Amino acid sequence: MLDIRLLGDSVLRQRAEEVEEIDDDLRQLAEEMFETMYTEEGIGLAAPQVGVPKRLFVMDIREDEAEPQAVVNPVVVEQSGSERGEEGCLSLPGLIGAVERPAKIVIEGLDLDGKPLRIEASDLLARCIQHEIDHLDGILFIDHLSPIKRKMLLSKWKKRLKEESRR
């Protein structure tokens, strides 16, 4: 299992690099990311969250119509509507906030065989994809919150870290 980087790690604030070559190392990374995501009970995980600044994420929202998917070099090509929904993050465990995002999106990228893929998404799938693409751009869900809500969550985060350091 891979170590998940937590808030404060500089890799989470960097724009990830385009993947130049899809090889066995990248496929192995994706496999280990899936394993880590499932172990931590997440629905998505971006490579920067495990310390690798590459434009790759994995996801599985665990709904019948949505297959587990690894996406390389994703780009949002269409978006419409708007909806607010609760989000959490494996890099900020225990924190949850309501984030406004486009309700429907279309992304293009590559699969792990280097084949082009296009995903049309709405609801939880769209939210998950946008959350993971944000990670690839060095953005965390708390960046979408109001300054007051963000300050409250960061205060909760600092308190939690303090408590854990005392143990």
Image (cartoon, rainbow, N blue to C red):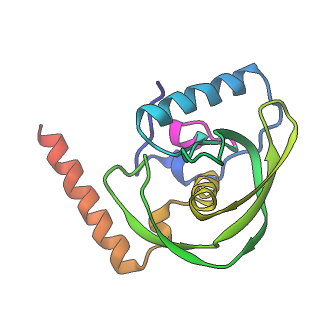
Quarter of the image that includes the C terminus: top left
| Residue 60 picture quarter | top right
Q: Position of residue 149 (x, y in %)?
A: 35, 75
Farthest-out residue, right: 115
Residue positioned 81% across, 48% down in the render: 109
Extreme-left residue of the structure: 166
Measured as percent of width and height from the top left, residue 101 is found at 59, 72
Instruction: Say above or below: 81 vs 32.
Output: below
Side of 148 where 3 appears, left or right: right
Residue at image position (68%, 40%) is 69
Tell me residue 133's x, y (percent): 64, 55
Q: Tell me if 164 is positioned left or right of 25 in this view.
A: left
Q: Nearer the viewer, residue 30 or 80?
A: 80
The boundaries of the magenta stretch are: 48-54
Residue 97: image location, x then y, percent: 39, 67
Q: Please tell me whether residue 109 is drawn above or below residue 25 in the rendered image.
A: below
